[in-house]
Amino acid sequence: MTTDAATGEATLSERLDRLPFTRRHAKVLTGSGVGWALDAMDVGLISFIIAALAVQWELAPAETSWIASIGFVGMAIGATIGGLLADRIGRRQVFALTLLIYGLATGASALVGGLALLLVLRFFVGLGLGAELPVASTYVSEFAPARMRGRLIVILEAFWAVGWTAAALIGFLVIPASDDGWRWAFALGAIPAAYALVVRWGLPESPRWLARRGRHEEAERIVRSLEESASLTASRSRRVVPAAAEPAATTARERLGALWSPEFRLRTAALWLVWFCVNFSYYGAFIWIPSILVSQGYDLVRSFGFTLVITLAQLPGYAVAAWLIEVWGRRLTLSVFLVGSAVSAVFFGTATTESAVIGAGMALSFFNLGAWGALYAVTPEMYPTSLRATGSGWAAGVGRIASIVAPLTVPPLLMLGGAPVLFIVFAVFFAIAAAAAWGLVDRRGLALDER
């Protein structure tokens, strides 16, 4: 282990990287993961609610498309603003604020009586959700030791499957139960507003961010608590020693410009392309799967039951990705899972029997969510601490542009050639993302701020 030349003491980054996984790490991971799962529950619920409202409110396909897409407009704005704010005021503060915004907006959605107000509230839901996800992955990555950082971020992403499964259960059991089932689903989605208080007061701020802001005493307290949890209390590790200073961008304009500096422009371009393509295919497919199944002749309950089974395949996808990402590395794992997603999309679009629909859907769920885990792991590693949340947020924001467009393209593509053409288009986007992944840098096992 290298040390500060003047003092012989370890830098903050070195101290964090040499730690084993402790109960304090588990608290950060679980606390962030619960927020992540609640986010997924909200995103998942809307796909079931759309299918129910299309029948109950007699909505046209264009109207149901906007229920999905307006949330993604909010996500795109939220991701870009949230990343900038997290680099300025801290990860924990923004994480809690975003949970509060979208939890309250989701709860209020249970009371709407028409499409216009629902669209307004869905925008605010997206605003909070879009800011939360890249900030949460940045937050956890800054606590994680280097040798297990990728695996822990994939485990964080796996909480998405927990939330989506909860949404599928609510969709299967609650929404079809009565005409007001969708209102009860929205009411359950308000839970994040209460959980925001837990995040605000129960989780520590990122010590890396605190140190970069010159708040060394606060950073020291947090690092020491981690070391004490791991019984690493030797005198050489008792003080935060600032690492060699990076040329830190201090304003939003400087941070955005730095993303396209010669050092980062290739990885930024590749990252944005991957995020765009993966968002297009994922949200185009999974938001519409219940409605597509209904349009193919399955009743609402049967369609929701199929979706629940397909959703369960997300968890083994995350588990395999979490193992491979520290064995194969980031780029290869991401690329392989994206290729698997492309192949699965073709099979799903051409499936004609119930068993083929379920099998291909489970494969798509397995590979696509494993790819998401790898993508969230690699994204914070592309940038130093002063740019990390900004870079992650803007990559997610560019991706959300695709998630706005994708639901709107589904109805015309279905009219053009049905599910086969639709899912071949999704497969092409997955394949482009798999190629673009090779423009990223692979930081497996390296310190987070190594450039």
Image (cartoon, helix red, strand yellow):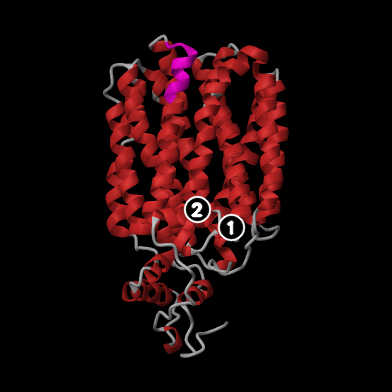
Residue 425 coordinates in the image, percent (x, y): 67, 27
Q: Quadrant of the N terminus?
A: bottom right
Residue 391 coordinates in the image, percent (x, y): 50, 53
Q: Point out which mark residue 296 bears.
A: none
Q: Point out which mark residue 264 bears.
A: 1
* 314 relative position to 201: left or right: right
Residue sitting at x 43%, y 38%: 75
Residue sitting at x 53%, y 55%: 259
Q: Point out which mark residue 391 bears.
A: 2
Image position of 373 with respect to 209: above or below: above
Residue 436 coordinates in the image, percent (x, y): 68, 46
**Magenta region:** 59-67
Image position of 312 with respect to 410: above or below: below
Q: Main secondary structure of the magenta part?
A: helix
Image position of 240 with respect to 205: above or below: below
Q: Is residue 66 magenta?
A: yes
